[in-house]
């Protein structure tokens, strides 16, 4: 009876699979036929549009030929007829396109308006039927009507030459739009056919499986039960299931007993399993995490990334009446059923030896690398400049910490936090790179990577920022280590041996007379950065600096940040490679100039490079690619608005991110720094020749100058 019922069910399933297969094939054929019909229509339209593209230049050439023949008194009948035929063909094809659906009406109307503008100048030429030449005893010459006809042809020729490019662009845009529509339809057809073939194969395989499958029933179940028991007794990890009440199920692996020193786990609450082995705070966090796993909208991969029990420190019995520290790794996998989550599968592994070994290796490697990096950087850096930078960087990182602590709930608030972090970190990285403190610059760069990763998430929570806090602590510790290293190098040079208490004291204390000039220090920093950028990017260029001694003391930090950012942009985006410069009849060495001067109304900073310049169209394309603008919004921008895109947060023309570019934060940092002082910034450019930034700053207050 049971066998007969199973066979009946199997036959029904097979018949259903066959019916579904037939329906699917019919659907694929119907939809495919419609798509093929649409493609054929689009191809016909595309052919007409492609024919139209050639007519503007053809008409212009025929008018030129007609004018030249009149000038040389040659026979004009053939050219005149060809011109009439071209105009007639254009009219017919354009009218045919206007009658066909599926053509962009706006583009078509624009093309029609341009073509109709030809009519007043072409009509006299096409309607001419007189004799253009007259014969005299002295030879042939243009007749009176021929002279008028020549004037009309010349006028039509000039009009065609000036109008042909615009008409050709409209027709090319029409062809491009039709080509894209045809390509999209063809892609959909290919996708439909591929999906249909795949579905047919899958359904055929399913039908074959149902037809050939035989019930193994109880024997398979007994074999599976025995294998499960063998696995649970052999596996070295603790395995168990949690139900909806967060209690352990009736089956678990033998290793779980060894890990927790007990035999009875059935019905035990998960919270009770960890109660005496972790701190109350950790227990509360773990309990909340377990509850989140049962949420229908919980993303499993995201939940794995924030697992608080990925490396859990616990106190377990050592078998001698005492306790010892172990590290356990819990992993959780949701078991889904028809109505949602049925169970959560938990695995527990003792990773104490792995943790201890990894910790020792990491500490040894990090210590060695940090010491080497710092030593190399310090040997090539001015201690006074480094000391000033460390003070500035510490203040900047305090601001970063303050931003991280700002409360936020909505996605917009989280996004504002990320934008603020990007600006501050980019400024610190720029100055570190300028001083060749690459160990610091690379760590800040890694923080920027983490910020950019968060920007790509559709939903943000406070927990997403926890890794940033940890990485910020590591960076602050590294800054302290740099301070200590500078002091050690200083004492080695002086031949003294500092006491233990001197390591946390400031690096140097200088009187006003001993302190280096701020302009000289800035010039040294910028020239060093210029040499490094030229070497890193393989673009030789020279940097000339004028008037830095006139920078007010209150403006020095801002001027420094602006010049560093603009210098990096010039090296990456502006100055071209040697081959490109030579092809453009430029010198092999690029020229970058920065000039500061005081005016009656305030101060002015001009930064200029003789590089590739800025292309408004390239800037628009980059904004669309970065999803900062839609194609429609970009098309509406004039050149001035397009140039202003470079100051937009997140904008960059580079597709890849490097230490010096690609984040879209550089010019945003410059603009924000200038606006903070009440200044203005403008940009002018000539593609292929130069880019010039002009920054106007108000006169500093008397207090700031003092």
Image: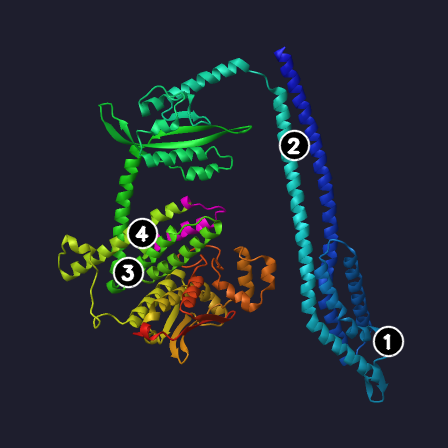
Q: Nearer the viewer, mark 4 or mark 1?
A: 4
Determine the image quadrant of residue 699.
bottom left
Does residue 455 belong to the magenta stretch?
yes
**Camera sees residue 570:** no
Look at mark 2 in the image and give the residue it sits on. 200
**Residue 337, percent from left and from top:** 53, 27
Label 4, residues with CA under 10 Å away: few <14, some 14-19, many ≥20: some
| 689 on left or right of 477 | right
Label 3, residues with CA under 10 Å away: few <14, some 14-19, many ≥20: few
The stretch of residues the image draws in magenta is 441-463
Sequence-first tag of 2 and 3: 2
The answer for how far apart the CA atoms under marks 4 and 1 are is 88 Å
Can you tell which mark lies on residue 129? 1
Label 1, residues with CA under 10 Å away: few <14, some 14-19, many ≥20: few
The answer for how far apart the CA atoms under marks 2 and 3 are is 69 Å
The answer for how far apart the CA atoms under marks 1 and 3 are is 89 Å
Can you tell which mark lies on residue 391? 3
| 303 on left or right of 640 | left
The quadrant the N terminus occupies is: top right
Query: Decide: marks 1, 2 in contact (CB < 8 A)?
Result: no
The answer for how far apart the CA atoms under marks 1 and 2 are is 69 Å
Determine the image quadrant of residue 135.
bottom right
Residue at image x 39%, y 28%? Answer: 270
Q: Nearer the viewer, mark 1 or mark 3?
A: 3
Sequence-first tag of 4 and 2: 2
Q: Nearer the viewer, mark 2 or mark 3?
A: 3
Look at mark 4 in the image and give the residue it sits on. 475
Sequence-first tag of 4 and 3: 3
Q: Taking 459 as reference, is 347 above or below it?
A: above
Residue nearer the viewer, 248 or 522: 248
Considering the numbered disc 3 on the image, is that residue within a helix, a strand or a loop? helix
Sequence-first tag of 1 and 3: 1
């Amino acid at each position: 009876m049971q066998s007969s019922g199973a066979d009946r069910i199997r036959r029904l399933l097979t018949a259903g699979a066959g019916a579904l297969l037939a329906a699917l094939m019919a659907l694929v054929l119907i939809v495919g036929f419609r798509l093929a019909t649409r493609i054929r229509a689009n191809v016909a339209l595309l052919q007409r549009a492609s024919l139209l593209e050639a007519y503007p230049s053809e008409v212009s050439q025929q008018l030129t030929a007609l004018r030249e023949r009149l000038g040389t008194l040659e026979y004009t009948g053939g050219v005149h007829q060809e011109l009439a035929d071209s105009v007639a063909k254009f009219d017919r094809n354009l009218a045919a396109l206007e009658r066909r659906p599926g053509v962009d009406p706006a583009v078509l109307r624009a093309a029609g308006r341009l073509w109709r503008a030809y009519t007043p100048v072409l009509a006299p030429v096409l309607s001419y039927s007189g004799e253009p030449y007259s014969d005299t005893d002295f030879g042939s010459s243009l007749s009176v009507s021929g002279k008028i006809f020549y004037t009309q042809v010349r006028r039509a020729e000039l009009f065609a030459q000036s109008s042909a490019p615009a008409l050709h662009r409209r027709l090319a845009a029409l062809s491009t739009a039709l080509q894209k529509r045809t390509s999209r339809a063809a892609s959909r057809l290919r996708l439909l056919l591929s999906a249909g073939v795949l579905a047919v194969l899958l359904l055929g395989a399913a039908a074959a499986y149902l037809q050939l499958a035989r019930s193994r029933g109880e024997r398979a179940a007994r074999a599976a039960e025995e294998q499960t028991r063998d696995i649970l007794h052999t596996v070295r990890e603790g395995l168990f299931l949690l139900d909806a009440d967060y209690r352990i199920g009736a089956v678990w692996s033998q290793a779980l007993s060894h890990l927790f020193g007990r035999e009875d786990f059935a019905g035990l609450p998960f919270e009770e399993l960890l109660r005496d082995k972790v701190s109350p705070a950790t227990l509360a966090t773990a309990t909340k995490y377990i509850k989140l796993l049962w949420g229908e909208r919980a993303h499993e991969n995201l939940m794995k990334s924030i697992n608080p029990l990925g490396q859990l420190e616990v106190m377990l019995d050592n078998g001698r009446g005492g306790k010892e520290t172990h590290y356990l790794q819990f992993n959780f996998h949701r078991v889904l059923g028809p109505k949602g989550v049925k169970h959560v599968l938990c695995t527990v592994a003792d990773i104490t030896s792995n943790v201890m070994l990894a910790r020792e290796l990491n500490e040894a490697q990090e210590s060695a690398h940090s010491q080497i990096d710092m030593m190399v950087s310090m040997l090539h850096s001015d201690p006074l400049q480094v000391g000033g930078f460390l003070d500035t960087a510490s203040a900047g990182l305090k601001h970063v910490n303050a931003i991280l602590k700002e409360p936020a709930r909505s996605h917009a608030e989280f996004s504002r936090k990320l934008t603020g972090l990007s600006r501050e970190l980019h400024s610190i990285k720029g100055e570190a790179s300028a001083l060749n403190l690459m160990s610091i610059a690379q760590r800040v760069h890694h923080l920027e990577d983490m910020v950019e990763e968060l920007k790509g998430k559709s939903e943000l929570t406070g927990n997403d920022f926890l890794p940033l806090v940890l990485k910020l602590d590591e960076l602050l510790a590294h800054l302290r280590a740099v301070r200590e290293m500078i002091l050690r190098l200083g004492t080695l040079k002086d031949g003294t041996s500092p006491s233990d208490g001197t390591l946390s004291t400031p690096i140097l204390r200088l009187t006003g007379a001993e302190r280096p000039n701020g302009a000289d220090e800035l010039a040294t920093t910028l020239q060093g950065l210029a040499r490094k950028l030229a070497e890193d990017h393989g673009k030789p260029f020279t940097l000339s600096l004028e008037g830095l001694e006139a920078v007010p003391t209150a403006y020095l930090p801002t001027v420094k940040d602006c010049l560093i950012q603009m210098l990096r942009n010039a090296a990456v985006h502006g100055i071209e490679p040697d081959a490109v410069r030579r092809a453009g009849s430029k010198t092999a060495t690029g020229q970058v100039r920065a000039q500061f001067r005081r005016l009656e109304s305030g101060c002015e900073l001009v930064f200029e490079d003789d590089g590739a310049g800025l292309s408004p169209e390239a800037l628009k394309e980059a904004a669309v690619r970065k999803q900062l603008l839609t194609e429609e919004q970009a098309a509406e921008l004039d050149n001035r608005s397009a140039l202003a895109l470079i100051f937009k947060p997140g904008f960059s023309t580079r597709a890849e991110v490097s230490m010096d570019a690609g984040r879209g934060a550089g010019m945003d940092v410059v603009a924000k720094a200038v606006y903070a002082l009440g200044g203005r910034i403008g940009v002018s450019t000539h593609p292929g020749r130069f880019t010039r930034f002009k920054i106007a700053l108000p006169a500093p207050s008397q207090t700031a100058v003092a």
